[in-house]
Amino acid sequence: SFAAAGALFFSAYSLFSKSDVIINKSGNPEPWETVDPNKPQKLLTIHQKWKPIEELENVRKLTK
């Protein structure tokens, strides 16, 4: 019962606090655009640095 309660709690936690978990796909077709790069998305992050990839940023600017 402890494992089931833990799984239920983690599912609810992920559903309401993580930006990569979505329910309504029609409301925002590109949810990855709203992810904050400064906020870690993993449970445990060790020395992770985010920096934009220049080629991807150029492609993104051209497609919008």
Image (cartoon, rainbow, N blue to C red):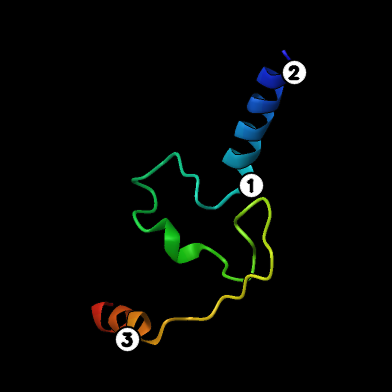
Task: Look at the picture and state if 26 lies above or below 54.
Answer: above
Task: Looking at the image, tell me whether mark 2 or mark 3 is earlier in sequence order.
Answer: 2
Instruction: Find the distance from the CA under tag 2 to the CA under tag 1.
Output: 22 Å
Dividing the picture into quadrants, the one containing residue 9 is top right
Q: Which residue is mark 2?
A: 2
Which label number is shown at residue 58? 3
Quadrant position of residue 49? bottom right
Kindly identify the amino acid type of the residue bearing the numbered disc 3: Asn
Q: Residue 22: where, in percent of width, then height?
A: 46, 44
CA neighbours of label 3 inside 10 A, class few (<14), some (14 to 19), many (20+): few
In the rendered structure, which disc, 3 or 1, sits on the residue that comes first in sequence?
1
Quarter in which the N terminus is drawn:
top right
The picture places residue 56, in percent across and down from the top left corner, at 34, 79
Q: Earlier in the sequence, mark 2 or mark 1?
A: 2
As drawn, is 41 to the left or to the right of 54?
right
Q: Total number of numbered labels? A: 3
Near mark 2 (Cα within 10 A), the count class, few <14, some 14-19 or many ≥20, is few
Q: Quadrant of residue 11?
A: top right
Label 2 to label 3: alpha-carbon separation: 49 Å
Residue 63, placed above or below residue 24: below
State if disc 3 and disc 2 touch (CB < 8 Å): no
Between circles 2 and 3, the one closer to the viewer is 2
Q: Which residue is mark 1?
A: 17
The picture places residue 54, in percent across and down from the top left corner, at 39, 87
